[in-house]
Amino acid sequence: MSKSFMMLAPVVIFFAVLMGMGFYIQKRSSDARAENYSKDYYIGGRSLGGFVLAMTLVATYSSVSSFLSGPGVAWQKGFGWVYYASTQVVAAFLVLGVLGKKMAVVGRKTESVTAVDIIRNRYQSDLLATISAIVIIVFFTTQMIGQFVGGAQIFSAATGLSYEAGLIIFAVVVVLYTTVGGFNAVAITDTACAIMMIVGMLCLAYAIITKGGGIANIMAAINEASETARATGEGFDMVSPTASNSIPVQLFITQWMLCGVCTIGLPQTNVRCLAYKDTKSVHRAMMYGTIVVGAMMVGMHLLGVLSRGVLLSIPEGASTDTVMPALISQYMHPVLAGLTIIGPLAATMSTISSLLIAGSSAIVKDIYLHHKEAKKEKVNQSVVGKISIGMTGIMGIAAVILSINPPDIIVWINMFAFGGLQAAFFWIFLLGLFWKKANRSGALWCIIGGLGSYIFVYITGITIGAFHNIIVGIVVGLICFIIGANTGKPVDDKIGRIFFPEKY
Amino acid sequence: MNKMSYKEKFVQMNKEAKATWIAAAVIIIFWWLAGFGVYGAFGTELKIFGMPAWFVLSCFGSWILSVVLVAFLIKAVFKDFSLDDELSEENSTEEEEIK
């Protein structure tokens, strides 16, 4: 058996299982879909249990960078980068603990299916809802393309297939199962993906520690590299938290916001608060999610550092993104390598599937169906089905085509998509659910001011010290929100009684 | 499962959200002290499992602390109740009104 065949076998089996899940879910949910298509297709009929909720949250959140770029940088900079990445440990329980139940309760009361439904019902503004849907569509599409590119690169680097072949193979799989299976398929495949990420991580840990000759030997190599760096000033002090001051303290502070606290505003993750079954599920998910996200973020980045004991250098001028694929293809048994490569592919696919289903819901549910409802036109459930499936497919295929040779503008937008979503939505969700004075004008000012200022500092290259630009978007957004809330019309009692019954 | 009115659920959820924020703040403070604090006090000489102590304490420590705090939250603060509004009488009429 050839090496590449042995390596591809586990990947192909995994892909087949994912497709099978998609079609099985489609078959199983035909009754539920006949009754209310959007509720089943876009939110899975609010049926997620604790384990699946936790896994889909973590899998969506951990993307190709958690497996590729992050550990690559850790290989170069050392333990400081793991410290930097460990800020993500709060991400799982924060969104569920703060927004989880409230979104579920008001979501059921207002029959909301998407994150934009919550915004529309809370602020009673079609303008705000439409802006939100457009922001979601633009950022999700560019992020999806970013993930497709990353996934295809790692696939081709590890298997030796061409970039295009790698892209087509795994893109077809993810677009297909998401399109036919809808949200439930996304959640179930995400769970499979999360499990395979852990498996991949364990295989990698085994390979690195045995090839490196044990922790003691690996640490000796790292200490030596650090001493050289301290003496010569070249390279990085791998055992200091700031990696020879290349990660300033201000960056740590903004990292807590960008990858910790403000992640509760991301619509692709907080929409899951509308999808779970009962309070027991959300409690369990907080626990499982925290265990898994911590293991994965600390574990993967630590493996990046330890791989320094195996792979001493990379070719001159090569990006640190090549560290992990090189490690997998050169130092692992082909079957084990195939199993490991599923990890980053799974991280990529689980992020894409969630972006795709949520992006499609923004077009179909938040724009098209709302438009029909506003005109009081009845829409047949089977028509909704055709449109939902069609739109998901079209969006997925468009993203794949754009990934073959991504236009510069998309690469550029993707750089600030993650922060942009937070700048746009963090306060809208948080204040919308916890501050009665939050109103339509505040939210509109916030999304325009917060996102606008964030994009503005990105374009002009203005920086505030060593802080990440997200701080500008969040602070300006808050100021705009407070001004708007104090000048605009307060929310009426009908909405107030739904979102803030404790104030009456 | 606790029977709660729609209003009582919101009082409870506000309490839960506040407790979650406090837990996050405790984790951030611990993370800072165990990382920069221990590094400042001991440098890289102090080691755990052969790795720098500041790293093990801050990264693995914050993770374990998070799990412990979440366990405390769901045991002591968070309560089970129905996510549907089964007690409220004006339930149906209100839903009609929003539409």
Image: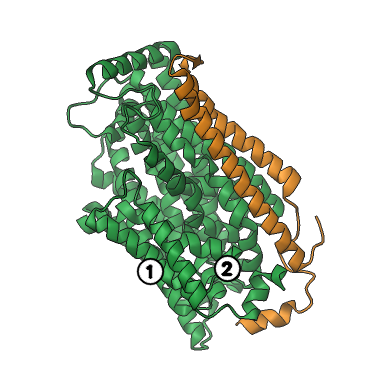
Chain colours: A green, B orange
Label 2 resides on the chain identified as A
Q: Nearer the viewer, residue B99 or A188?
A: B99
Circle 1 residue? A448
Left/right of residue A243 with respect to residue A319 in the rendered view: right
Q: Quadrant of the N terminus of chain A?
A: top left
Label 1 resides on the chain identified as A
Q: Looking at the image, which residue is at 30% across and 17% down?
A: A225
Q: Which mark is residue A322?
A: none
Mark 2: secondary structure = helix
Q: Nearer the viewer, residue B72 or B99?
A: B72
Q: Position of residue A484 (x, y in %)?
A: 47, 73
Task: Determine the image quadrant of residue A326.
Answer: top left
Residue A162, above or below A381: above
Cα separation between marks 1 and 2: 30 Å
Amino acid type of the residue that numbered disc 2 sits on in the rendered structure: Lys
Of labels 1 and 2, the one closer to you? 1
Q: Is residue A199 visible?
A: yes
Q: Position of residue A271 (x, y in %)?
A: 53, 60
Circle 2 residue? A39
Q: Is residue A389 visible?
A: no
Mark 1: secondary structure = helix
Q: Position of residue A284 (x, y in %)?
A: 67, 45
Q: Position of residue A72 (x, y in %)?
A: 33, 32
Q: Quadrant of the C terminus of chain A?
A: bottom right
